Each structure stands twice: as structure tokens, then as C-alpha cells.
Amino acid sequence: FISKGFAMQDVDVIVIGAGAAGLAAAKALRDAGHSSVVLEAMGRIGGRAWTTDTDFGVPFDIGCAWLHAADRNPFYPEAQAAGWTLYHHDMTLDHLYFGARKADAAEMARMAEAEAALSGCIAAHAGPDDRLSSLIGDCHCLRASSTFAGPMDYGADDDEISVADFRAAADLDPNYFTREGYGALIHRWGADVPVTTGAPVKRLDWSGAGVVAEGPFGRVRARAAIVTVSTGVLQFEEIAFHPALPQTHQEAIFDLPMGLLTKIPVAISGTRLGLAPFDDLLIERHARHDLFFLCFPWDLDLMVGFVGGDFAWEMEAAGPAAAVDFVTDRLVDLFGSDTRRHVGHGIMTNWGGERFVRGGYAVARPGKAAARSVLRRPVGNRIWFAGEALAPDGLTQTAAGARLSGQAVGAEVARMLEG
């Protein structure tokens, strides 16, 4: 740990951020025999992986919850080894509503056809318009399919998603939930990494032979730095780079804005509303004010609402009371006025308002899919970037991808130190 005050400390590498990427980078450096210090602005490790049990009396993932791509997700075998309870979630839409009207069987069939058609259009797309919205048209079933592809998946509306970037993302099946919490699993995995929490880096000086990080913790000097904070934090210039980063990297950071997926879970007692545990329910509404529900996970008295994209930013600005009211009203629209008496405590996640995150995960602007590869390039052989925005193998926007990114960059920096 770093003592308070402006005492200089020498290490091989400074790792900024103790999410999955930062923890993985520190582990890779340690395995290679190199010293590092991990500086985390928040008061805990895990970043956007965070499980609590204070809101509903059971583990609830405030952040990432799905173990995506379990066949290549390094957290999956660790969950198995730890005895975590796992459930395969096939992500098939079970219930679809257009406003308060339930889709009929023919519309559900057209929805499945639209999903396949959209996938085919994305794979074949070569036109000048790189916006996902250019592939949607006026078909309401195709629009419903694009809701999964856009706000409820990428965290951005389809007119703000690059087709090329979306196409580069991997198929994330098989997807699993863990009852004990994904955040708790990541915290368990990273617990052996010494981390200085409450230590935001305010300035990173790379004007000399190495780097110097400065903040309320003091000053730390190293040969290199691995920056794993979100692109949202970088866009708000929470860290001042001296000298300024190259123009290419600055542009890449701003070409990878943060998308947002906001959870609004509410307790439901005394009824299951005719729904089965883990059912997926989507309500398509006007102006992308769409709402998705994960119904009664683990057969708990809980309906987990999700809003994404621009509407998620609007909802977080409105606040938790408005969010819970919105979700409650939509359940009443679907299941009748008696539903209201079954609704209890509710909360809203607020990653957009978290200063040291500022969103859900990075989304490339249309026409800017190459920004990810630009930001992967080291700066002056002293500064590297890592995280979900830069994940390999199409695993962007995932905790597994963040870990793999940090691990790869940690190993790369270790090789540089030895060269």
C-alpha cells in the first residue's frame, strides 16, 4: 500500500483501475516477476462487477450479471470450481408486447424471422451508411429484434451503433447466470491482488523516461502504466496526461462513448403473473422507451427491469423513484390494476452517474469501429490501455473480455520490460 503524502515510490508498472482488466494485468505482471501498484479511485475492487445483498436480502448484481461466452470465459470454470450455482440462459424471447398488447403467435414467428433477417443484413452489410438503424426500416417485428441488438445489448440506440463494430462482436452464447453473483465471483478472484482503493489518479506524467502518477495518495514512479479506466472517465479527462496523448488516441477515446443499460429491479410478492422463472419479456413502446424484464430469476420474488440506450440516460436523470414508478406502471398495463399491490421495494442502478465509470460499456460510433484498434496501441512505449472497450476475440463489453484484455496487456508490458 502507498502511504499518504507526496512520497515517491518506485515500481515496474502502475496499473490504474481495479476492475477485471486492472486485476488481470496485475496478476500477469506478478506471474512474470514484475512489481506493480494498483490504484483504484473507488472504495472497492471490481469496477462494474459489483454484487450486493442489502437491497433484496439476496445477492444482486448491480453491474455485470451474465457470464457471457461461457465456453471461452475464464470466469466460468472458476465459478464451477468455487461451487457457484449456475443457470444457462438461452436469451430466447418468451413474451413480446407492443405497448400493452401482447404479440400473437404470428407476430412471435415474424419476430424470430426478423432476428434471422437482421443477422443476415449485418453480416452482408457493405454500404456507406454504417448505422445499425439503416438496416431496420419500418417493420415493427424487425424493430423489436433490433431492441435486443441495440439498447438491451449494446447499450445504445440503433442509430448510434456501428454495423462494423457490431459485426466484429462475437456470439456470446452460451450465457449463464450465477446465483451467488458475478461481481462476488470477480471480487473473490481478485482478492489476492494488493490494491490501494480511494486513490484516483489525477495526473499521469510521461514526459520523462518512465511515468509518474499523481493523486491524493501522493506520487508513484514506474517504467510504464496500464490504464484500465472506462472511456467515459477518459472523455471527462479525470486523468490529465502530460504531455497530452497523441491526437489519434484522443480521437479514439471520443469515438468510443459509453453506452448504458440500467436495471430497475422491483420486489413482487404473492403472484408470478403467469410467468416462469427466467422468462424474457420485452415491451416495445414509442420513441425507444422500451422495457425488458428478466422475470423471477432463481424463482425469487423479483422482476428485473432493464432500459437501455438514450432512454437509460433519461431514466437515470429522472431518478430511482421515477424509474420504479415507470416499471410498476408498465406491469399494471400488462397484468391489471391489482398488480400494483404486489409491488414492493425497487431500486435503480446508476452507472451513468458513477463518477469513476460514467456509463455501462464502450460503443463505437458509426464509422469509427477502428477506434478500438487505435487505442490498443501503446503510447511512447510507456502507456498502455486495457479494458472491455479493447477486449480481444469479439468479447468487447464483457467482464471476460476486460480480463482477457488486461491479461494480454500485462504480458505485453512484461515482455517490454524484459527486452
Image (cartoon, rainbow, N blue to C red):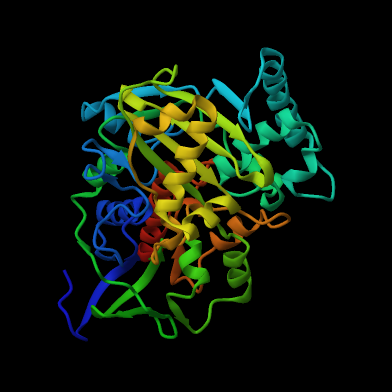
Q: Nearer the viewer, residue 109 or 395?
A: 109
> Which percent across, then down, holds residue 73?
40, 34
Q: Nearer the viewer, residue 294 or 34?
A: 294
> Which percent across, then down, holds residue 309?
58, 50
From this view, report whether residue 334 is shown above or below residue 131. Answer: above
Tell me which residue sits at (68%, 42%) in the image: 286
Which quarter of the figure has residue 278?
A: top left
Give the side of residue 380 with respect to residue 67, left or right.
Answer: right
> Which percent across, then down, holds residue 18?
31, 58
Tell me which residue sits at (29%, 69%) in the image: 12
Tell me which residue sits at (26%, 80%) in the image: 216
Which quarter of the figure has residue 53?
A: top left
Would you say residue 259 is visible in this rendering? no
Would you say residue 338 is visible in this rendering? yes
From this view, report whether residue 355 is shown above or below residue 83. Answer: below
Which quarter of the figure has residue 284?
A: top right
From this view, report whether residue 321 is shown above or below residue 100. Answer: below
Most distant residue in the right direction: 127
State which quarter of the image contains the N terminus.
Answer: bottom left
Most distant residue in the top direction: 105
Tell me which residue sits at (65%, 47%) in the image: 165
Q: Nearer the viewer, residue 178 or 297?
A: 297
